[in-house]
Image (cartoon, helix red, strand yellow):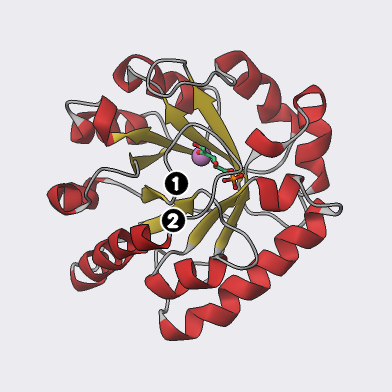
Amino acid sequence: MTDPSHSVAPDDVILAPSLLAADFSRLGEQARGVEADADWLHVDVMDYHFVPNLTIGLPVVRSLRPATSLPLDCHLMIADPRRWAVDYAEAGARNVSFHVEACDDPVALAKDLRAAGALAGLAIDRDTPVEPYLPLLENFDTLLIMTIKAGFGGQEFLPHLLDKVRTARRHASSGHLSLRIEVDGGIADDTIAAAAEAGADAFVAGTAVFGADDPAEAVRRLRRHARDAQGSAPVTDIS
Ligand SMILES: O=C(CO)[C@H](O)[C@H](O)COP(=O)(O)O
Ligand SMILES: [Co+2]
């Protein structure tokens, strides 16, 4: 299988700054500010239905695509992913994650996303257990585990949700799955190591990056913390 992260070495972590915490009047500029240090750019799509918040949609993703060299990591927090997810792949998203709570046939949608040339991501919100979905993971490139309740940035990291990361990582390792496990919500200098030790190898950070005085340095620091923590939980080879 090809490396789902593309430019990222399979044994390295993925840092994905979330534009949710950026200045929405300067998205291209903010993206370019972390280009040299980040691996993906996380784009939170919310629709006022699946979550009680509204952010950005397809027109913004289409505009962002040529504005940055970073692969776009679209996190769809929308009520009808089967209607929209492939459009995000066609708009140039590298990874498209949709929520299992909003989709009655996740495997079919994963196949559609891969056929459209994107990586397929399954997202799991705070109150959803991971166990029922373990058998589906062989159809996915990424598993996004929320470490907050989906909907808003700037929330406090919920450490007990790392049990889901541990469970998913054990499953992926024992089944030799090529799966990135991405954590999203409250990832910062004081939380990223615990997530990496639990088995996450892709990290979304909004407030900790775009809320920092120097977003690029914040990404570099997060990467150091994640790599330092990797010793106790080697990441899966996805090449
Ligand atoms: O999906 C999300 C919210 O639903 C965001 O990606 C997440 O909140 C990132 O922001 P922060 O790092 O500030 O928590
Ligand atoms: Co997100």
**Badge 2 local density, few (<14 within 10 Å), some, or many (20+)?**
some
The mark found on residue 158 in the picture is 2
Is the residue indicated by label 1 positioned so its CB lies within 8 Å of ligand 1? yes
Residue at x-position 62% and y-position 42% = 18
Q: Is residue 94 visible?
A: no
Quickly name the residue at label 1. 148
Residue 1: x and y in percent read 35, 57
- In the displayed structure, does residue 149 sit left or right of residue 31? left
- Residue 236 placement, left or right of 72: left
Marking on residue 92: none
- Looking at the image, which residue sits at the far bottom? 231
* Of the image marks 1 and 2, the number of the one nearer the N terminus: 1
- Residue name at image x 61 percent, y 14 percent: 59
Q: Is 82 or 77 nearer to us in this picture?
A: 77
Question: Are the residues tagged 1 and 2 within 8 Å (C-beta)?
Answer: yes
**In x, y percent, where is residue 94?**
51, 39
Q: Secondary structure at mark 2?
A: loop
What amino acid is found at the position of numbered circle 2 in the picture? Answer: Leu
Query: Does residue 58 appear in this view?
Result: yes
Q: Residues within 10 Å of mark 1 (few under 14, many from 20)?
A: many
